[in-house]
Image: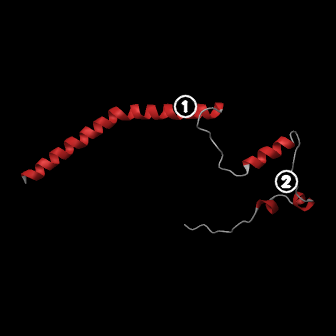
Amino acid sequence: MESLLKFIVIFFIVFYGVKYLFRLLMPFALRKMTERLMQKAQQGQTGGGQYQYQSTNPFDQFKQQKSAEHQGEIRVDYVPTDEAKDRKGTQTAGEFVDFEEIK
C-alpha cells in the first residue's frame, strides 16, 4: 500500500512538473518555429535560398506557357445552345423531390 501511495505522489509531481515546463517552453518553441516559417516564406518570395516552393499541380507549367503565348485574348470554353437559353424557371433549376411533412 505504501508503494502505491508513493507511486501516485511521484506520478503527480512529474505530471505537474512536465505541465509547468511545457507552459514555460512552448511559447518560446512556437515563436522560433514561426520565425523559421517566415524566413522560408520570404526566401521563397524573393527566389533566393535553398527553399523553392513548387506547385504540385502538373498542369501549371502548361498554363504558364499557354498564357504567355496568348496574352490579352479571351477564350470561352462553353457556349450554351439556343435551347438552353430559352428554358427559364423550374426547367433550369434541376430536379425536385416531393416530400411529406411528418409530425
How many other residues sit within 10 Å of disc 1, few (<14), some (14-19) or many (≥20)? some
Residue at mark 2:
77
The spot of residue 100 in percent (x, y) is: 63, 69
Q: Secondary structure at mark 2?
A: loop
Q: Amino acid at mark 1?
A: Gln
Badge 1 marks a residue whose secondary structure is helix
Give the left or right position of residue 74, taking residue 15 as reference. right
Q: How is the image coloured?
A: secondary structure
Check disc 2 and give the amino acid type: Asp
| Left-right relation of 11 to 101 | left
Which residue position holds label 1?
A: 39
Q: Nearer the viewer, mark 2 or mark 1?
A: 1
* Residue count near mark 2 (Cα–Cα under 10 Å), binned few <14, some 14–19, many ≥20: few
Q: Residue at x 88, y 44 (%)?
A: 74
Q: Quadrant of residue 19?
A: top left
**Residue 59 rendering spot, x and y as whole percentages:** 73, 51
